[in-house]
Image (cartoon, rainbow, N blue to C red):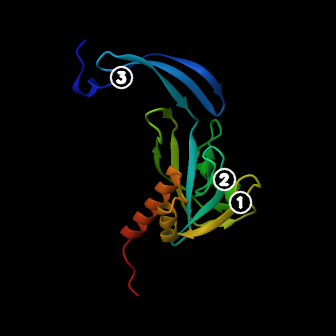
Amino acid sequence: MTRTPAEHTKWIIHGERVVDENPHIRLSVASVELPNGVEFDQYVVRLPRCVMTAVLDEAGEKILLIWRHRFIIDRWDWEVPGGYADPGEDPAATAVREAEEETGWRPRSVKHLFTFQPMVGSADAPQDLYVAYGADLVGRPHVDEAEAVRWVPLDEAQRLIERGEIVGGATIMAVLHARAVREAAPRRSP
């Protein structure tokens, strides 16, 4: 069989065996073949869709962040709110629900920015990033969600990234995107 140029470097999957599975993760071993004929087993992680929300103030100058401990990396960091989409749930509804649960602020509306895969070499973990401009305080965050909730100026959020106080990929993308949108906006004359 002759391969097209685009298929020349495509790996062939001969099968995949599930090692462990629950509602939050599926770990499997895939038998793969490289274009040069070398065959080997590769661990594959599959995660459900996760949705994060960059909640910005109406002026687009501040972003709503939560301070939380992540036990897997054993460190505290600032993050945008987010979590798993429930089965059959519209991701936009997830964006609003997770923001409210984790911050106590309900976004007035949300817009899908993009979907990304954070670990394409070893995991299928689709993540959606939404943006919201404006939110209403409707309650308190769930006790298990955050140590602190804070509106952070975008320039300060950039410095938090540079100091390693923001390490999550979705939050870094949210801050950089919000700053790029702000910089591209026409300047208001005084």
Does dot 2 land on a helix, a strand or a loop? Answer: strand
Q: CA distance from mark 2 to mark 3?
A: 38 Å
Query: How many numbered marks are there?
Result: 3
Three-letter code, disc 1 = Glu
Residue identifier under label 3: 11
Three-letter code, disc 2 = His
Are dots 2 and 3 in contact, CB under 8 Å? Answer: no
- Structural crowding at the residue carrying mark 2, measured as other residues with C-alpha within 10 Å and reported as few (<14), some (14–19) or many (≥20): some
**Residue 126 sits above or below residue 52 on the image:** above
Residue identifier under label 1: 147
Three-letter code, disc 3 = Trp
Estimate the x, y position of residue 142 in percent, counting from the top left.
75, 55
Disc on the earlier residue, 3 or 1: 3
Residue 64 in which image quadrant: bottom right
Q: Determine the residue located farthest toward the top in the rendered image.
A: 1
Q: Is residue 81 left or right of residue 39?
A: right
Q: Quadrant of the C terminus?
A: bottom left
Does dot 3 land on a helix, a strand or a loop? Answer: loop
Label ID, residue 69: 2
Q: Is residue 114 left or right of residue 26?
A: left
Q: Residue at x 44, y 36 (%)?
A: 120
Disc on the earlier residue, 2 or 3: 3
Estimate the x, y position of residue 153 in percent, counting from the top left.
53, 71
Q: Residue at x 53, y 54 (%)?
A: 167
